[in-house]
Every structure is written in structure tokens, then in C-alpha cells.
């Protein structure tokens, strides 16, 4: 009977090899298609190599603890004529020439070794992993042998086309248990999932809800991090009593953030490619809960606007946002935003910055807490709140984020200067 090779699968875009940790079959064993027969380990996870087709194990060349390159032949399956033809009809011609000619610099290294100069190590080419020429063949023919990793991210063109037709994203399929190779979602899985949705009560999501969902999905493609610190709000609350109109604590925080960024504008720079882009003005957004979503109108030049004027602008923008009358121009161009999640009684949170912003400063609920006074040598009741700063870690590191937060705390300690 003809033989079909079992090859080391491509385990990820950056993976070049894997280590065998277990072999679950022996020569002579009958196997089904997509049956897991070998466990391999990468620096990410333990995965399974599955059979390309049904048949009988003819030979296993791999050894436990052996390291094999992607495409290396791990063994062979005796298969039917039809399956064997399916795996060979699109196979490319094997590479011609010596290995030394395929690897840049190998000829020079060999020459140096031969004349006594350079390295004294000879390359034993018989010990190199066998690279299977089938590994780059047309995947429509069933190649290469996939890794048995549940929830694999690969989607076939047919599934992608169907998703595009229905305006679905990959996140929409997170709950789908794939039945294909390596847990991949097949077109049948997708249609079954869609059919199950028809049996559930559903309604069209609002435009603002879908807009928020899309923005958060795009934001989450970045490496985000959050740091936090406690702040005493007593100075702010005392200063607020003296002002008319009376700004809320979130506006004090917004003003402090604007002044801190005016001193260190690089903290809010956006990284595009290998360029860090800085804004010409300190424009800060304010997260406002609107009907079925969040709107973030922007206060322009917040570092150059007094706290009294900020209060008037804030009141106007919040009213427009809650009536969903904020225009696209009112929400564009901010470099950072402030979210007062303390109004919901929350102490701490990790809000996500908008896709076009680097920073989001969150304010938790103010609560009475005992604080040690060095001056009076006793605990005193103070109003404490948590400040959290979520940021794009590509543009800002923990040290820079921490210093920015400490500057904001310092400014909140002298609110008369805001």
C-alpha cells in the first residue's frame, strides 16, 4: 500500500521547531483521520500532531525528547490509493542541489573548515531533520498535518467569506467549539452556530453599542497595561466648597491630567510604526454613559482652560452626550480620556483607552479610611479614592506611567492651583 508522510505541523507563525513529548501509537496500529498520535511541546504550549488520513501506522521515525523542524517527517501511514493520491498530486518538486548551497554562508564555512581556518566544527548533514516537501503543498489537498490545539485561530477562506457576508468578527466565534483539525471552526460548525442563534431571543444592537464594540475590539489589539495609586480627596472636596460653579472630583482629575501632560507630552504620544506622534494640543476626552453605550466628547486645550470654564464646557458636553447629540468633530482628536467609574460605587477598574488614544485615567469612589498622620502621631479619617491609569505599553512603560500618576496626585494635593 502507498505511504503518506506524517509531518511536523506549523504550530504558529513564529515557530520553527518543536520537541516530541509523547508518542501514542506504534507501527501496525489502525488510526482514523485527525486522530492525535503525537504530543509536541513548544515554548507556548503542548499540542498534538494528528493523522492526515485513516490507515495503518507503517513507521514512526520520531523519538521522544527529539527536536524536529516544521515540515520534518515524523513517520508514515499506509493509506488507500485515493488518500495517497490526494496528498501527492500537488506536491512540489523536491529542492535540488546540496544543502550547503541552500543555506547562505554554508559553502564559505565549509571552505574555512577545510583549509584549517575559521570554525573546526563540521556539519553532519545526515543529522539534519528531514524536511518534508509536502509541507508547503496546497492545504486544500489536506496538508500539512495540523496541530491538535483546541481553539486554533486558523479560518478557511470559505468560513471567512461567510463571516464577511454576515459582518461577523473572529471574536463573535469565541464560543464555537470547532470540530475540524486542531479544533478549527469549519463551515458546518459556523452554520450550526448560526442556526442555534435563530432559536434565541435577539434584537438588533444599537449603532452606539456596535460602535463601542468595534472600538474596544480595535483597542484590544494593542498591549495594554494598568497601574494605580491611592489619592486623598480631602483637599479637592474642601476647595470645591469655595467654587461656583462647583466642579466634580472628575474635573479636578481631568485638569490635573492635562497639566501633567503639558509638562510631559511624550507620555501621551501615539506610536505609529517607528514614529512617536505628539499632539499640538492637550485635548482630553470625558467618558459619559449614554443610552446603550459610552460617548467620549473631548474638551480642547484642557491645560489652558481654567477649572471654572472646564465646568461649563463639561456640563454642556455631558448634556449633549446623554441626548446623543454629540457630533463626530466633538469626539475626534483627543490624546487621553478620563472615566469616573466611581459614580457606580466601584473602587478600582481597568478601563480601555480608545483606539486613537494612548491613555485613560480612571477615578474610583471616594471612601473614608484611616490614614496615619506623622504630625499628630495618630490615625485620622480621610477620603481616599483609587486612580488607575491604563496605557498603550508600546508608547509608555510602567515607570513613566507611575511618574505621571504621582504628578497628578501632587497636583490634586494643591487644588487651588488647578
Image: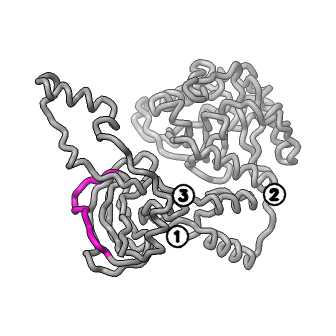
The first of marks 1 and 2 along the sequence is 1
> Up-down: is 152 above or below 27?
above
Q: For mark 3, give the secondary structure.
A: loop
Which label sits on residue 210? none
The first of marks 3 and 2 along the sequence is 3
Which residue is drawn at the image coordinates 42% and 63% (left, top)?
A: 145
40 or 2, which is in the foreground?
2
Which residue is drawn at the image coordinates 75% and 61% (left, top)?
A: 166
The region drawn magenta spans 57-69
The residue labelled by disc 3 is 154
Nearer mark to the viewer, of 3 and 2: 3
> Up-down: is 172 above or below 264?
below
Residue 313: image x %, image y %? 82, 31
Q: For mark 1, give the secondary structure.
A: loop
The residue labelled by disc 2 is 206
The residue labelled by disc 1 is 180
Which class describes the residues within 10 Å of circle 3: few (<14), some (14-19), or many (20+)? Answer: some
Amino acid at each position: 500500500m502507498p505511504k503518506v508522510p506524517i509531518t511536523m505541523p506549523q504550530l504558529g507563525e513564529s515557530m520553527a521547531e518543536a520537541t516530541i513529548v509523547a508518542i501514542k501509537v506504534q507501527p501496525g496500529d489502525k488510526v482514523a483521520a485527525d486522530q492525535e498520535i503525537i504530543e509536541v511541546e513548544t515554548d507556548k504550549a503542548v499540542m498534538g500532531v494528528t493523522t492526515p488520513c485513516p490507515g495503518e501506522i507503517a513507521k514512526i521515525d520520531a523519538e521522544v525528547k527529539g527536536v524536529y523542524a516544521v515540515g520534518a517527517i515524523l513517520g508514515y501511514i499506509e493509506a488507500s490509493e485515493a488518500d495517497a493520491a490526494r496528498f501527492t498530486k500537488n506536491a512540489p518538486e523536491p529542492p535540488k542541489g546540496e544543502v550547503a548551497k541552500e543555506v547562505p554562508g554554508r559553502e564559505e564555512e565549509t571552505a574555512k573548515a577545510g583549509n584549517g581556518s575559521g570554525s573546526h566544527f563540521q556539519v553532519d548533514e545526515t543529522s539534519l531533520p528531514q524536511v518534508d516537501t509536502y509541507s508547503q503543498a496546497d492545504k486544500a489537498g489536506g496538508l500539512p498535518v495540523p496541530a491538535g490545539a483546541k481553539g486554533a485561530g486558523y479560518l478557511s477562506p470559505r468560513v471567512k467569506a461567510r463571516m464577511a457576508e454576515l459582518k461577523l468578527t473572529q471574536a463573535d466565534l469565541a464560543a464555537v467549539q470547532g470540530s475540524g483539525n486542531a479544533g478549527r471552526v469549519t463551515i458546518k460548525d459556523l452554520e450550526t452556530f448560526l442556526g442555534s442563534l435563530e432559536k434565541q431571543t435577539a434584537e438588533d444592537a444599537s449603532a452606539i453599542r456596535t460602535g463601542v464594540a468595534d472600538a474596544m475590539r480595535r483597542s484590544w489589539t494593542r498591549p495594554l497595561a494598568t497601574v494605580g495609586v491611592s489619592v486623598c480627596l480631602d483637599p479637592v472636596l474642601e476647595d470645591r466648597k469655595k467654587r461656583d460653579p462647583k466642579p466634580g472630583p472628575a474635573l479636578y482629575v481631568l485638569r490635573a491630567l492635562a497639566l501633567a501632560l503639558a509638562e510631559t507630552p511624550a507620555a501621551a504620544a501615539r506610536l505609529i510604526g517607528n514614529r512617536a506622534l505628539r499632539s499640538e494640543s492637550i485635548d482630553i476626552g470625558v467618558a459619559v454613559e449614554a443610552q446603550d453605550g459610552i460617548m467620549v466628547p473631548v474638551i480642547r486645550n484642557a491645560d489652558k482652560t481654567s477649572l471654572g470654564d472646564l465646568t461649563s464646557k463639561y456640563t454642556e458636553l455631558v448634556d449633549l452626550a446623554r441626548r446623543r447629540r454629540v457630533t463626530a468633530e466633538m469626539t475626534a482628536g483627543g490624546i487621553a480620556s478620563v472615566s469616573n467609574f466611581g459614580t457606580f460605587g466601584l473602587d478600582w477598574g481597568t478601563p480601555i483607552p480608545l483606539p486613537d488614544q494612548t491613555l485613560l485615567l480612571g477615578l474610583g469612589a471616594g471612601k473614608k479610611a484611616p490614614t496615619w498622620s506623622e504630625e499628630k502621631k495618630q490615625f485620622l479619617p480621610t477620603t481616599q479614592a483609587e486612580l488607575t491609569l491604563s496605557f498603550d505599553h508600546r508608547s509608555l512603560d510602567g515607570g513613566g506611567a507611575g511618574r505621571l500618576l504621582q504628578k497628578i496626585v501632587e497636583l490634586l494635593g494643591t487644588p487651588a492651583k488647578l
